Amino acid sequence: MRIEVDRELCCGSGMCVLTDPETFDQSEEDGVVQVLRTQPSAERQAVVRSAVSGCPTSAIRLVE
Amino acid sequence: MTTTEPPLTEAAPGPAQTCPVMHGTQPAAAGRDLLNYPFSGAVPLDPPVEWEQVREQCPVVAVRLPSGDEAHLVTRYEEARALLADPRFTRQIPVNAESRIGASEDGGVFSRQATSGLKIFEGEGHLRWRRLMAKAFTIKRVESMRPRIQALADELVDKMVAAGPRADIARDIGAILPVRVIGDLLGVPTEDLHRFATWSDAILTLTRHSKAEVDAARQDFGIYLAKLIEAKRAEPGDDLLSELINITDSEDGRLDMVELIVTAMAILVAGHETTANMIGKMTAMLLADRSRFETVVADPSIVPSAVDEVLRFDTNPSIGVPRYVSEDIAVGGAEIGAGSTVIVSPAIANRDPRRFPEPERMDLRRTNNQHLSFGAGPHFCLGQPLARAELQVVLGTLARRLPTLRLAIDRRELRVKQGLIVVGFEEVPVEW
Ligand code: HEM
């Protein structure tokens, strides 16, 4: 599983950072999402999925 | 532990409605017997019976606004979320649109021309603006403000305790904490903050103020901010306004002077009364059934999920999120004609059983609670990390310091502030 983000869609809400700070961070400059680990470990996948569904602009995608 | 909202009212049937999806009719027929919107719950803290009726009837329902005009009300979660993310639905409603929302001559705050034509409100220009603003609202930045918010909450509770054992949460915390926090963030002197309540009330008016009053408030507010900007230019501080002035003065096209003033105004207005009201509503919702509050007292680690559940559950929400559409678009199978006003109701969508299991139950530990109270899509509330932090700090502090807190009046006696776009209680009297 690989994480892809659409920087244009991202509104910088930080919801993903709240949900999974091990996988996501935000740029200090413009709040845009930064993926710390693009290929999350097996145990991480559930929480990554909830970060994906929790994104208010649907800017995070999982490629299986 | 979870609790169910005990209904105090019998469900009263509303006027017969025809679902344009099911019946293939166009909703915009003048003089029809439409539901008046916003619906008013018969008892404070009970959701209006119409919420479930309209949601189950149809994903899009025609309603009558306070202005007398018609609008399309979006009632279901999936459609609401998709619509808020759809750029064809714009946020600015021209005054010459078919329907106006407020009863004041120019159609109320949503359609005021004062802010139209600015490129920061829509599309590319809006995205650039968000990038400039987001910096001040990242999770880290907001977390760094938490100690200050906590100190403020403790100070306010100290005062309540000294004057107690009775207080009014709306007056003693709601009216003070959010405006102080937003004042700190922007760099507005504390002694000036009392002026914002008056201005923001006028700007957020639905039926309460005349156009002249609203214009006067806008003008005074603008003049005040222009002066503040001058002062900060001479003596910059460590605050958002000083930072934005720098950007404006660099004249690189990212933010001009008018946009700067409108931005400061927007943040002050949006960050103030919404959160102030929510502090009162949160307290009322949790105390109306004290087992809810006791759950938080017993396990303060649930404060974050409790706050989001309270946001989802909001029984006295604002009118909703308006959108304007300039082409014919189908939503949930219904045709929405060019020129229509569409209103997304987060509160109605937040109780959609298609999305939330047992939606009418307040579950303070609810997970996957992606409610729409902060909107969705590109305009998703800029200030939501701050609003969440404020609500979490207030709830945590009340539970820790006043575990015997209870409502000092019957919940049927809670009075809703009338005539404004954002909704809250006049008073939330408590005792401990
Ligand atoms: C409980 C409190 C709050 C609620 C329920 C709330 C709700 C909302 C909603 C529903 C929207 C979307 C409007 C739309 O799509 O047209 C929004 C946008 C916005 N909110 Fe909030 N808000 C709250 C607190 C705050 C705070 C504390 C601030 C500022 C510090 C703030 C600043 C804004 C701004 C600037 C926007 C416009 C964002 C944009 O257009 O990109 N809000 N809010």
Image (cartoon, coloured by chain):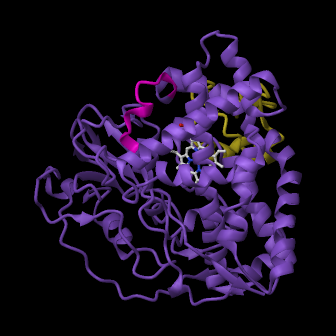
Indicate the colour of chain B: purple
Q: Quadrant of residue B109?
A: top left
Classify residue A43 as left or right of residue B58. right
Q: How many marks?
A: 0
In this rendering, the answer to whether B416 lies above or below A6 is below
Q: Nearer the viewer, residue B61 or B213?
A: B213
With B266 as the anchor, is B392 left or right in this view?
right
Residue at 69% across, 32% down: B228
| Frontmost residue, A64 versus B51 | B51
Image spot of residue B393 (x, y percent): 79, 62
Report the residue at 70% width, 18% height from top.
B247
The span picked out in magenta is B110-120
In the drawing, does residue B385 fall left or right of residue B53? right
Residue visible at 77% across and 32% down?
Answer: A39
Task: State the yellow chain.
Answer: A
Q: Main secondary structure of the magenta part?
A: helix
- Residue depicted at 45% across the width and 56% down the height: B421
Viewer-nearest residue: B184 or B329:
B184
On the question of residue B402 being in view, the answer is no
- Residue B360 percent across, percent down from the top left: 51, 74
Q: Is residue B115 magenta?
A: yes
Q: Position of residue B226 (x, y in %)?
A: 62, 29
